């Protein structure tokens, strides 16, 4: 499994499994001089788990972060930062019964083919949503770094099941209210409808998906390394690495395919001596390079594959068709947890590209 690191300058390496001892991250390349405490990471980790127990899995890990290296006297030193949360709530017996009967829609079958009988199937192992705690720990460091340069990354739930937010939100609403509702939608009325949709689907033993939108503000114009490290390509890759993400679009996205050039093009004007576009169908990236407009990206999250209703599968040990009812503790909808993960994923890529573009120095500020 030698593919657990991402980034060229701000390099993050994830390790840990759902039912192993821990989930952890090593961030290598974080500039020296960033004020960083465990509390900075803890705030973001807390955002990953919505406070409403009825809409999330019954496995609630406290996820108290510990920093093991790379921070001295409250500042990053430039050395690798290792941050870790322990797994304390795993119940592996739920999985022994189904180790030979892959859950449809999860990675059980592909993991078994890829790693044979050595695969750690407990709780989805390396393929579990639990591993996204590592995204959030690295993302917390990236976000703190970006904030020094006024760059802000904000994600929220745009749709859950067939409940869709049908109005444009202000930045203030997104910034101030996205983590105030359990479903992570800043519109309180829409959030209530989303929550009802999750409770309903849970009572039916089924699951639903949705859409997370993420905006990144004040990203400097001109970051991104075409051709193969385009900013949009790198963000899309990072988002597709988040389990359950099945689609990514920027700006007008797939709708652009139906527009005329005259409709899709974002005309330029000068405002306050700055070149800006009148609208943002490009989603803040042109030619793989940031345009100075907000980066707007949406991730489609599939319905949780582990559902309690009966499904057809195959018993791999006997090569016989059978059925499965997934017990375990699962989220009826992944979207509320995915919001903090998407925010983190985008922040990690932006931090990497800002260092690569020379906008972030290797030493942020000399201490006297
Ligand atoms: C935050 C988060 C939590 C998740 N929780 C669950 C879960 O409780 N049950 C489940 O079946 N899948 C869950 N997933 C999704 C699976 O990990 C994912 O569907 C699986 O690894 C297969 O990968 P794929 O959907 O990207 O193809 C979660 C994903 C995320 C991002």
Image (cartoon, helix red, strand yellow):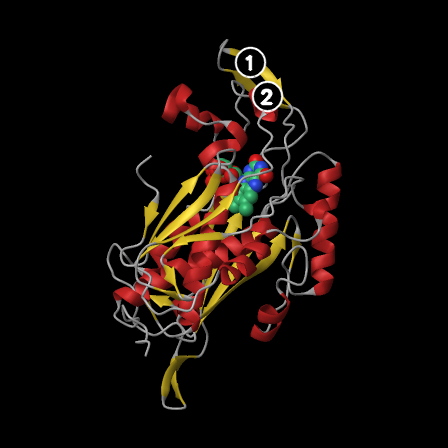
- Which quadrant of the figure contains the N terminus? top left
The residue sitting at the bottom extreme is 272
Q: Residues within 10 Å of mark 2 (few under 14, many from 20)?
A: few
Specify which label sits upstream in the sequence, 2 or 1: 2
Nearer to the camera, 98 or 38: 38
Labelled disc at residue 12: none
Q: Is residue 71 left or right of residue 158?
A: left
- Label 2 beta carbon within 8 A of ligand 1: no
Circle 2: element type: strand
Query: Residue 304's quadrant in the figure?
Result: top right
Q: Which residue is mark 2?
A: 312
| Secondary structure under the numbered disc 1 in the rendered image | strand
Q: Position of residue 241 (x, y in %)?
A: 42, 46
Image coordinates for residue 230, horizontal then vertical, percent = 30, 59
From the viewer's perspective, is 275 left or right of 96? left
Task: Look at the image and tell me in which quarter the C terminus lies.
Answer: bottom left
* Residue located at (53% from left, 17% from top): 314
Name the spot of residue 30 as percent of width and height, x first: 33, 61
Vertical position of residue 112 compared to residue 138: above or below: above
User: What is the count of numbered marks?
Assistant: 2
Disc 2 to disc 1, how far (Cα)? 7 Å
Q: Say if residue 56 shows up in the picture.
A: yes
- Residue at the spot of label 1: 321
Q: Residues within 10 Å of mark 1 (few under 14, many from 20)?
A: few
* Residue positioned 49% across, 55% down in the render: 342
In the rendered image, residue 148, in percent from the top left (x then y), is placed at: 41, 74
Furthest-top residue in view? 318
Above or below, comparing residue 186 to residue 12 in the picture: below
Q: Residue at x 36, y 66 (%)?
A: 285
Foreground of the two, 121 or 19 = 19
Would you say the residues marked 2 and 1 are in contact, meaning their CB atoms lie under 8 Å apart?
Answer: yes
Decide if ligand 1 comes within 8 Å of the CB at mark 1: no
């Amino acid at each position: 499994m030698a593919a657990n690191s991402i980034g060229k300058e701000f390099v993050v390496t994830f390790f840990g499994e759902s039912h192993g001892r821990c989930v952890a991250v090593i961030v290598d390349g974080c500039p020296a001089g960033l004020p960083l405490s465990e509390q900075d990471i803890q705030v973001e980790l807390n955002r990953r788990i919505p406070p409403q127990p009825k809409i999330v899995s019954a496995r609630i890990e406290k996820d108290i972060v510990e920093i093991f290296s790379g921070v001295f006297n409250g500042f990053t030193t430039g050395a690798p930062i290792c941050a870790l949360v322990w797994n304390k709530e795993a119940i592996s017996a739920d999985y022994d019964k189904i180790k030979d009967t892959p859950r449809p829609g999860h990675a059980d079958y592909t993991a078994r083919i890829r790693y044979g009988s050595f695969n750690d199937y407990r709780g989805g192992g390396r393929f579990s949503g639990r591993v996204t705690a590592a995204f959030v720990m690295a993302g917390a460091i990236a976000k703190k770094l970006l904030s020094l340069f006024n760059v802000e990354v904000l994600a929220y739930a745009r749709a859950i099941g067939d409940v869709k937010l049908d109005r444009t939100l202000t930045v203030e609403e997104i910034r101030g209210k996205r983590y105030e509702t359990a479903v992570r939608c800043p519109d309180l009325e829409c959030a209530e409808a989303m929550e009802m949709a999750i409770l309903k689907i849970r009572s039916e033993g089924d699951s639903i998906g949705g859409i997370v939108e993420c905006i990144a503000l004040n990203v400097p114009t001109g970051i991104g390394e075409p051709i193969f490290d385009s900013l949009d390509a790198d963000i899309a890759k990072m988002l597709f690495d988040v389990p359950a993400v099945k689609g990514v679009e920027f700006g007008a996205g797939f709708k652009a395919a139906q527009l005329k050039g005259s409709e899709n093009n974002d005309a330029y004007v000068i405002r306050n001596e700055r070149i800006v576009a009148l609208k943002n169908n490009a989603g803040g990236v042109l030619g793989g390079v940031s345009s100075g407009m907000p980066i707007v990206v949406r991730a489609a999250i599939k319905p949780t594959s582990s559902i309690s209703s009966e499904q057809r599968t195959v018993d791999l040990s006997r090569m016989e068709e059978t059925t499965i009812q997934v017990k375990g503790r699962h989220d009826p909808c992944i979207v509320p947890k995915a919001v903090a993960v998407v925010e983190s994923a985008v922040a990690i890529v932006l931090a990497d590209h800002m260092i690569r573009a020379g906008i972030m120095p290797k030493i942020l500020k000399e201490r006297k």
